[in-house]
Image (tube, grey):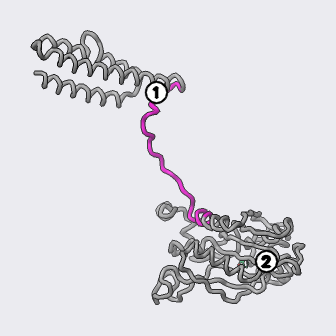
Amino acid sequence: MIDELKKEIEGARRSFIHELESIQSPEQLAALKERCLSRKKGVVSQFLARLKGFVPAEKPLAGGAINQFKEFVETALAEAERTRGAAVAAKGEWLDPSLPASELPVGRFHLIADIQRQIEDIFLQLGYEIAAGPEVEREEYNFSKLNFPEHHPARDEQDTFFLEGHDDLLLRTHTSPMQVRYMLEHKPPLKIISPGKAFRKDDPDATHSPCFHQVEGLLVDRGIHFSHLKGTLEAFCRSFFGPDIVLRFRPGYFPFTEPSAEVDISCFMCGGDKADCRVCKGTGWLEILGSGMVHPQVLRNCGIDPEEYSGFAFGMGIERVAMLKYGVPDLRLLYENDLRLLGQFG
Ligand code: PHE
């Protein structure tokens, strides 16, 4: 008989816990208390009423089990009244702060913003500062001070968005005008990167967009030469793409650097071993940025004496780097904001 009672008490205890967990209002809590502890018909009283039927030897055991249950119920109810009552008093609403929070969808950075932050992190570790500049730029900073000759095709309305009614204002075609802005306002040593949007009159296709993102880099100090540029870009590329990456510098041309170099990295996908590699198309190399030593005339244009100082600069496209690193086949995918694509990164 005692075993049967214990089983029933255990059943009552479980259904009590279950009911307590699903309580939604103070009224429901009061009703549960009534059902368990009311003197006449409460669950505990009903167990106590059965004590009479036990033989003297079993009575203490049965009484002990019932009392234990009673104490458990009383303590749990008092605790529930205290915590939920406090919530009602504080906020006028019924709330159990001990319940786990309901899950909310968590956002994350867009792939372009994420890559930008990865690039920033690496250069911050190399001691660079981040300097942001305006997207609407003076033609003087975007072109003239960067040594673009008067009739350079990039200055044409075909290629560049000029602002209506303002011949001297345009949407910057690259982040390089930040070199000018920074050099005009600061004395060397200078060590900055400048991420941001750039704009060109390109028809959108798999590799072009009228608006895209770049990260510019600039370092000016005494005694800076090409090996500093090489070492810096090598450190960046190995950190970003992988420790085994090899760099290739090809002669290039930019009006604001001399000498200039286009930089390729060895294909991180196939290492140059696969003729049908979808990332490097079998060439073994990937072009990732433009760079060079800051042209002495540009230093002069910005009030820095090229006899005393020298520097290097580089610029890379964030979309291009993102597409390479994650195998995104079409640039436009990055702007469509389809979560099925964007949700795969970050
Ligand atoms: N501004 C150049 C471009 O947009 C890249 C570059 C930056 C090249 C700095 C050399 C130095 O193509």
Please say whether residue 214 is visible from this viewpoint: yes
The x, y position of residue 115, in whole percent, is 59, 66
Looking at the rendered structure, the kind of residue marked 1 is Trp
Q: Is residue 128 magenta?
A: no
Res. 156 in view? no
Residue 94 - label: 1
> Image check: 243 left or right of 154?
left
Which residue carries the number 2 mark? 311
Q: From the top left corner, tell me how far across and down residue 318 is, in percent.
A: 62, 71
Q: Nearer the viewer, residue 149 or 165?
A: 149
Q: Which mark is residue 180?
A: none
Occupied quadrant, residue 174: bottom right
Question: Which span is picked out in magenta?
Answer: 91-117
Q: Is residue 115 magenta?
A: yes
At x 25%, y 9%, the residue is 40
Image point (65%, 70%), residue name: 212
- The residue closer to the viewer here, 331 or 191, is 191
> Split into 4 quadrants, where in the image is the N terminus?
top left
Number of marks: 2
Q: Which residue occupies 56% across, 80% down?
A: 245
Dot 2 or dot 1, earlier in sequence? 1
- Please say if the residues under marks 2 and 1 sit with CB atoms less than 8 Å apart: no
Q: Amino acid at mark 2?
A: Gly
Please name the residue shown 73% across and 64% down the image. Answer: 129
Q: Is mark 1 within 8 Å of ligand 1?
A: no
Q: Secondary structure at mark 1?
A: loop
Mark 1 neighbour density, 10 Å: few (under 14) some (14–19) many (20 or more):
some
Per the image, label 2 sits on a secondary structure element best described as strand
The image quadrant where one finds ligand 1 is: bottom right
